[in-house]
Amino acid sequence: MAIHAVYPSGDASEELKEAAEICFQCGVCCVLRAHSCHAQYDGQFDPRHTFVYDCLGTEEPVENPNLWLCVSCHKCEELCPYDVSPVHFIEAMKAQAFEMGSAHPSVLSEIEQIVETGFAFPLTGSSARQREVLELEPLKITAQDDLKVITEETGLGTKLRRHREEEG
């Protein structure tokens, strides 16, 4: 199974690998309509080839662009009859993909937006007008200096620059 590419020999316990095998074969989190994984309804997946199967079963999981469809909502964790939770494997694969330079461009843009402004979405004039209509105080942008320090201290800034250089 390809999940071993994420947890190569020595990096994960046999228990973790067995949990990944169970997850790989189950798919309950993707087939319970109205309660399942949002990514499952992307159109390319079905009950026999689920989103989780696609993520865990590809030859090189960290190069699978479908990983980035997972929004880490943890619905799979709530539904998992085996208490395995595929979100943990998918998050590990995303982290490894990011380290390897395979992050989706929208993820990089989102991170840069947060570091620059402290908000996940751009604040527009429309946002300001809507806050005024609702009689809310204007949003104060105060976190960006701290976020920039944290980004540099954790090495995230270096990784973001490396990703952008590789794109360019």
Image (cartoon, helix red, strand yellow):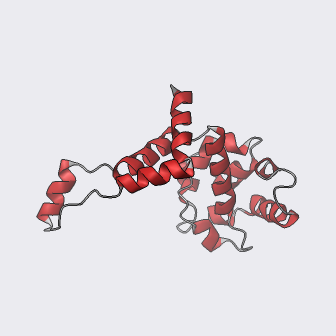
**Position in image of residue 92 (x %, y %):** 67, 55
Residue 120 visible in the displayed image: no
Q: Residue at x 69, y 44 (%)?
A: 62
Count the marks.
0
**Position in image of residue 23 (x %, y %):** 75, 62
In this orientation, which residue lies closer to the viewer: 130 or 140? Answer: 140
Residue 27 visible in the displayed image: yes
Name above or below for residue 93 compared with residue 29. Answer: above
Which quadrant of the figure has residue 97? top right
Asked if residue 149 lies left or right of residue 101, the reply is: left
Asked if residue 36 lies left or right of residue 121, the reply is: right
In this orientation, which residue lies closer to the viewer: 78 or 133? Answer: 133
Q: Residue at x 40, y 51 (%)?
A: 114
Name above or below for residue 4 compared with residue 78. Answer: above
Q: Residue at x 62, y 37 (%)?
A: 101
Name above or below for residue 52 compared with residue 76. Answer: above
